[in-house]
Image (cartoon, grey):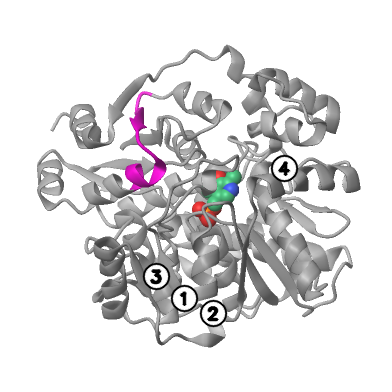
């Protein structure tokens, strides 16, 4: 039986997994979403002996069921290899109050690598399967981490081109350098005078621009998306929740079937949605705790059922979560309203026209799985220090947002269910914030902070950061938000 992916905005727009991956975003503006969960009957005892790659094979073959076994083996082998600095791929670290699932051991030291190291292979395999020989152009808006991880994945992959837009003043120095020094003939990086939402909104608009699409097709070019709206991003993220549960069982920290909670530092809602799907296929997860920074639109949504984007955008120390329009929430909304595409479309239209929408009738059993909270900048800094004092371990600001929200949740709920926090970035990606939180002193410079962080934590400096200082800057283009399409047309010659 083939799993059906349907657009969240049109019940007649149904595709298979490989078609969904190739298109990225549905032409109607919706997101391809599985209508039902595959029946997996996960055997966790057996999985305690499985490698990350084996767990990936199990999950991917269930969700991407129009791929052959050989195709998936090829994709998995090329993705989860020595690019990762540990054979565990996603190690689980036990701290005094929670477990950190370290998702930052890939080439760009943030969790986006977990999915973006496999997406280029899933995408080029999907194109082959669909008999498409157009050049595939990946158009991506990034709040800092996606862009670099996508370029690392797609650089010099034949038949592809990648264009990344990032907010000029919205990313850390290390993040910016990671992008502007990117190698590869087919990579393009553009800074915009705007914030992440401006970039993401215009990327979505270009995807839906029929005229632009037609002009590209004449040149045998088509867009695809590396954003977490692509199901090829989402599905590989389910893997590590299955893997983490098996690891907890293996170490005897839980018994088989015992429930765990998962806390996720959330921006575009992709990572936490993957945790929800992991629960749906049988991982015993009790609570999904959605952690936000001061851009707490999701906290308010879960508390009031009203999604209201009309608020000031805040630049925080956890920039990858500085988001007011959380794309993947649309998939949860779709499920909350009973997989009703017409209703979802209406709500999303209200978000554009009125800046908000309100849910009236929802599936309460789904909503009840979620807890939500936010951490202020001061909370985040204090949390980094507390975790360091308690464990001699330094969290990055995104992980610390989750850790702080979880600490507050645990204190007010008295829920001491073992809890896994998705640890989404290495502190070396945000060294100044991490060092200042621990010592109270600003290092003044990112690279000085890297050395100080090393002194404090004793953790080896990742190659991704060590090599950055010497790497030549190759991309210097800055455009106003209104100039994004022009930049795309110039790169592609249309
Ligand atoms: C992208 C990102 C997030 C947010 O993940 P979503 O899937 O967008 O919710 C959190 N932390 C880091 C470090 C990220 O790069």
Q: In the rendered image, which quarter is residue 20 located in?
A: bottom left
| Label 3 lies in ligand 1 vicinity (Cβ under 8 Å) | no
Residues under numbered marks 1 and 3 in contact, where contact means CB atoms less than 8 Å apart: no
Comparing labels 2 and 3, the label whose residue is closer to the camera: 2
Q: Which residues are magenta?
A: 185-200
Residue 307 position (above or below residue 212): below
Residue depth check, mark 4 versus mark 2: number of the one nearer the observer: 4
Q: Say if residue 458 shows up in the picture.
A: no
Instruction: Measure how far apart labels 3 and 4 are at the Cα level.
Output: 37 Å
SS for callout 1:
loop
Label disc, if present, on residue 381 of the rendered structure: 4
Q: Nearer the viewer, residue 62 or 172?
A: 172
Residue that badge 2 annotates: 367
State the image coordinates of residue 223 (x, y, percent, origin top left). 26, 46
User: Which residue is located at x 45 percent, y 30 percent?
Assistant: 169
Q: Are marks 1 and 4 in contact (CB under 8 Å)?
A: no
Residue matched to label 1: 305
Query: Which residue is drawn at the image coordinates 63% and 33% (left, top)?
Result: 429
Reading the image, the residue beneath label 3 is 33
Q: CA distance from mark 2 to mark 3?
A: 18 Å
Q: Which mark is residue 351?
A: none
Q: Earlier in the sequence, mark 2 or mark 3?
A: 3
Residue located 87% across and 63% down the image: 251
Tell me the element at label 4.
helix
């Amino acid at each position: 039986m083939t799993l059906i992916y349907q657009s969240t905005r049109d019940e007649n727009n149904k595709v298979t997994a490989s078609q969904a991956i190739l298109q990225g975003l549905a032409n109607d503006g919706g997101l391809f979403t599985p209508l039902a969960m595959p029946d997996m009957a996960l055997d966790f005892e057996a999985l305690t002996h499985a490698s990350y790659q084996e767990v990936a094979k199990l999950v991917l073959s269930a969700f991407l069921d129009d791929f052959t076994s050989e195709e998936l083996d090829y994709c998995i082998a090329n993705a989860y290899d020595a690019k990762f600095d540990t054979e565990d791929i996603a190690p689980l670290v036990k701290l005094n109050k929670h477990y950190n699932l370290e998702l930052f051991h890939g080439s760009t030291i943030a969790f986006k690598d977990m999915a973006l190291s496999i997406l280029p292979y899933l995408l080029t395999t999907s194109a082959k399967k669909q008999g498409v020989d157009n050049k595939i152009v990946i158009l991506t808006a990034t709040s800092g981490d996606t862009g670099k991880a996508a370029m690392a994945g797609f650089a010099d992959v034949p038949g592809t081109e990648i264009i990344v837009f990032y907010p000029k003043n919205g990313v850390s120095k290390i993040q910016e350098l990671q992008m502007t020094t990117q190698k590869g003939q087919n990579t393009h990086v553009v800074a915009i005078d705007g914030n992440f939402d401006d970039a993401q909104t215009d990327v979505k608009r270009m995807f839906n621009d029929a005229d632009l699409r037609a002009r590209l097709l004449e040149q045998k070019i088509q867009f695809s998306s590396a954003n977490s709206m692509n199901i090829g991003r989402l599905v590989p993220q389910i893997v590590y929740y299955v893997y983490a549960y098996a690891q907890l069982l293996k170490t005897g920290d839980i018994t088989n079937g015992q429930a765990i909670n998962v806390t996720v530092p959330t921006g575009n809602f992709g990572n936490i949605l993957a945790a929800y799907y992991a629960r749906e296929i049988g991982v015993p997860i009790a609570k999904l705790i959605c952690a936000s920074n001061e851009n707490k639109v999701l906290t308010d949504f879960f508390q009031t059922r009203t999604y209201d984007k009309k608020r000031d955008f805040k630049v925080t120390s956890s920039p990858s979560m500085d988001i007011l329009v959380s794309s993947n929430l649309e998939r949860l909304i779709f499920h909350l309203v009973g997989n009703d595409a017409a209703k979802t479309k209406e709500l999303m239209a209200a978000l554009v026209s009125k800046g908000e929408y309100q849910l009236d009738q929802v599936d309460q059993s789904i909503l009840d799985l979620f807890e939500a909270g936010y951490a202020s900048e001061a909370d985040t800094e204090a949390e980094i220090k507390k975790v360091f004092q308690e464990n001699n371990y330094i969290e990055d600001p995104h992980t610390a947002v989750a850790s702080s929200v979880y600490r507050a949740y645990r204190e007010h709920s008295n829920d001491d269910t073992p809890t896994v926090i998705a640890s989404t970035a290495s502190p070396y990606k945000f060294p100044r914030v991490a060092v200042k939180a621990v010592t109270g002193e600003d290092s003044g410079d990112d690279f000085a902070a890297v050395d100080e962080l090393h002194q404090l934590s004793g953790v080896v400096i990742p190659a991704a950061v060590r090599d950055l200082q010497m790497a030549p800057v190759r991309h210097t283009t800055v455009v106003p938000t209104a100039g994004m399409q022009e930049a795309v047309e110039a790169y592609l010659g249309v």
